[in-house]
Image (spheres, coloured by chain):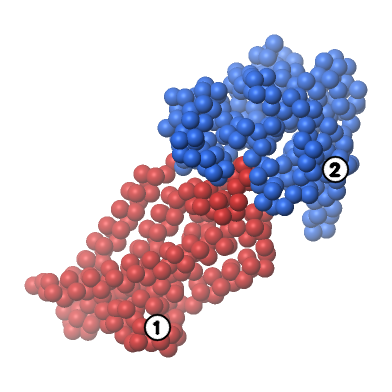
Amino acid sequence: MIEFVNLSKNFNKKNSNFQALNNINLTVQQGEIFGIVGKSGAGKSTLLRCANLLEKPSFGNIILDGVNLNSLSEKELRLKRRKIGMVFQHFNLLTHSTVFKNIALPLEVAGFSKKEIKDRVDYLLKVVDLSEKINSYPDELSGGQKQRVAIARALANSPSVLLCDEVTSALDAQTSKSVLNLLKKINKEFGVTILLITHQIEVVQYICHRVAVIEKGGLVEVSKKEEFMQEPKSREGKSLIFSHDFSSEMAVSFI
Amino acid sequence: MIDFTLLYSSLLATLLMVFVSAAFAFIFGISIAIGLTITAKGQFLENSITHKILSAIVTLGRSIPFVILMIAIIPLTRFIVGTSIGTSASIVPLAIAAIPYFARLVEGKFKSVSPGVFEAAKSMGLSPLQIIFKVLLPEAFPGILNATTILLVSLTEYSAMAGAIGGSGLGNMAIQYGYYQFNNAVLLQAIAVLIILVLVLQYVGDFLTKKVTRNH
């Protein structure tokens, strides 16, 4: 369970003070797939990055499974981060390491033995269905395959939460769908809570249980997925749904 | 008529100057480059004071023309190796000039490592030291190889200058035994060996760099 309590974030530039997040209160339940939507610049990325303190909030707290992340020392935070997987839009794999090395990295730093690492990487590659690519380099993989490796890496230390930052935005429709299917499977089989941000309504429609709408740094709506798709409560939610092209290639492939 | 003894001893002196000073430049230059990179704005140990101090030292080191540096640090050279002439005496200014040069080169290579991988490393719970050794250095490895090639070629060039003043190496051979004694054959031999040396360094460096480089 992730709780954002009175969360605010200001960015202080030389002559201006930009408020990226304004008093966010939000609870994501254990085992949920929760989507955060909003236009670009609305603050959804900042909110996600606050969830593992890649971005330090200016005010407020993030409570993960009952632990207030702000109260942790640097070292405790590093340990905690192993239990919070993160997947990125542009994969962020080590380009000069093989698939095996990429997935082994979080296990290495967690102090597992060589044998344990080998077994775990083999298992994770089975989960993401890429066992045959174990010795490939990222530049030999397609976008979808790279994202699968990134997901396997994020799952290495059996996290309770997976943070997904626009994970399908760099992928085509078919590949997006298969990556989302994988996330669904992970959520179901391992009970991993998934918090994702996206600007693609299809993603919400396809895998989310609940959805929050963020506008200019403020939370304007939290709804069940079905409610949101049929009758969004907020003006911003309506604008996202009604401006959405349900006949686009992306949308059609998700029907 | 080729004087093989002279050629051989000059080549050996040049190689010694180049590789010993390169070793110092490599160790200290990479250390400074790491310092510059991790303290830069937005990096995981951001610290503008340390960054500015390091940057100022590097710029200062790079701003002094090599010929002048060599003469200016003669007391230091004497203190370290006990003499101001000969091969080992030439290594001191070469290393001192090469450290900031290599630091800047490698800093540039570090900058081209995608910021996203540091972000991912942080999200996986890596400590700053782990990020340096398990992410920054492996990701920049082809860049470091390329920078090392440039370093070795530059040092070959500068060693000729250092040797001309310090009295050893191919540069010394070309000037003392070639130019000053009106012996064009010796001059050309020294030049030919220098060219071959640079070609070999560049070729081997490029070959190795290409071998380990992968696309993003």
Indicate the quadrant containing the C terminus of chain A: top left, top right, bottom left or bottom right: top right
Q: Which residue is mark 1?
A: B80
**Residue occupying image coordinates x 34% and y 54%:** B205
How many numbered callouts? Answer: 2
**Residue occupying image coordinates x 74% and y 24%:** A31
Residue B200, percent from left and from top: 27, 57
Instruction: Name the side, left or right, on which A180 lies relative to B201.
Output: right
Mark 1: which secondary structure? Answer: helix
**Residue occupying image coordinates x 56% and y 40%:** A106
Q: Nearer the viewer, residue A24 or B111?
A: A24
Chain bearing tag 2 is A
**Residue occupying image coordinates x 64% and y 40%:** A82
Q: Which residue is mark 2?
A: A7
Pointer 1 local density, CA inside 10 Å: few below 14, some 14–19, many at least 20: few
Colour red maps to chain? B
**In the image as oriented, which residue stretches furthest toward the top?**
A255
Instruction: Name the side, left or right, on which B101 lies relative to A237.
Output: left
Colour blue maps to chain? A
Q: Nearer the viewer, residue A185 or B38?
A: A185
Instruction: Name the side, left or right, on which A130 lies relative to B205.
Output: right
